[in-house]
Amino acid sequence: MNVNEHEERQDQSGDDAQVSTGTSPDTGGVPEAAIPELVIISGMSGAGRSTAAKCLEDLGWFVVDNLPPALIPTMVELGARSQGNVARIAVVVDVRGRRFFDNLRESLADLEAKHVTRRIVFLESSDDALVRRFESVRRPHPLQGDGRIVDGIDAERELLRELRGDADLVIDTSSLNVHELRAKMDAQFAGEEEPELRATVMSFGFKYGLPVDADLVADMRFLPNPHWVPELRPFTGLNEEVSAYIFNQPGAKEFLDRYAELLRLVAAGYRREGKRYVTIAIGCTGGKHRSVATSEKLAARLAAEGVETVVVHRDMGRE
């Protein structure tokens, strides 16, 4: 089952807000408590919003699907009066809200004025993947009207462009199934204590395209390619012989040292700005040797410095 097959059965269900939770908040006559955590889930239709929301619900979050953005501050206020019963709120906001979606910017400003800590998770996917998902469930895109699916996708991308730029976490689900998306959400939200910074170090192959959810991109194609060494070609950057070959090349160790130093500077800035998630993409031609070995080394450096780190090898095995 892909991301969309799970999501589309509930993603086109109308404009009425749907609330799902394992607990019922009691807001009557209760003194105001701590302001709850807030996560706003948005992104492209068919990219997995419902799956991401379900994951948070399973982790104990109070999930509100398709809540008009103008009501988000009210939802947070109710949570603050619930005696701690609603300590974490996740709100799914998408184009099904149509006329309400324009109120999101105003609601975000209201939350900021009230010092509410909020995070935006944006689900992204390629046009090809979205078209396949809509065709597989035989449902129209909510914005396509009398046009094609791609017309609706284009209109939605334009509508969501500014929100995507404000997102704290962008997840590209183009090549993910439901279980892989849930694993990504679990990695970000399952911990009981929120770390200062979480990093995903992702190896990739340039011939398969840049990762759309990358915050930083490094190009390892300045190093000799082990693909052209017959005894190393069958292996990957996870193999010790391949890694040793790469980091014995001129400039490899120096790059790792300098890039790790740069990331320390960037990480400090992210922390000051309240950014908690960063995706660092390391690329080579095919995503098999140089990018994989470098990602492993870099992730080990980050972990040693207290950054909670996940390594993803996006294209390894595709050749």
Image (cartoon, rainbow, N blue to C red):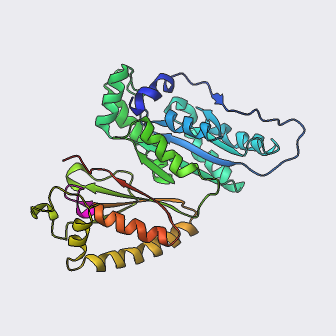
Indicate whether 41 appears above or below 299: above
In this rendering, the count of numbered labels is: 0
Q: Is residue 162 visible?
A: yes
Q: Position of residue 27 (x, y in %)?
A: 83, 37
Residue furthest out toward the right: 29
The residue lying toward the viewer, choosing from 238 and 2, is: 238
Using residue 316 as the reference point, say whether residue 200 is left or right of it: right
The residue lying toward the viewer, choosing from 50 and 227, is: 227
Q: Quadrant of the N terminus?
A: top left
Residue that appears at 62% across and 58% down: 194
The residue lying toward the viewer, choosing from 181 and 16, is: 181
Query: Within the magenta stretch, is there residue 97?
Result: no
User: In this picture, which residue range is highlighted in magenta?
Assistant: 283-291
Using residue 225 as the reference point, say whether residue 12 is left or right of it: right
Q: Position of residue 3 (x, y in %)?
A: 41, 33
Indicate whether 70 appears above or below 187: above
The residue lying toward the viewer, choosing from 309 and 282, is: 309
Q: Position of residue 205 (x, y in %)?
A: 24, 55
Q: Is residue 159 visible?
A: no
Residue that appears at 37% across and 21% down: 137
Using residue 259 as the reference point, say whether residue 196 is left or right of it: right
Residue that appears at 24% across and 64% down: 290
Residue that appears at 58% across and 34% down: 100
Using residue 8 as the reference point, say whether residue 212 is left or right of it: left
Q: Position of residue 161 (x, y in %)?
A: 43, 46
Query: Within the magenta stretch, is there residue 287?
Result: yes
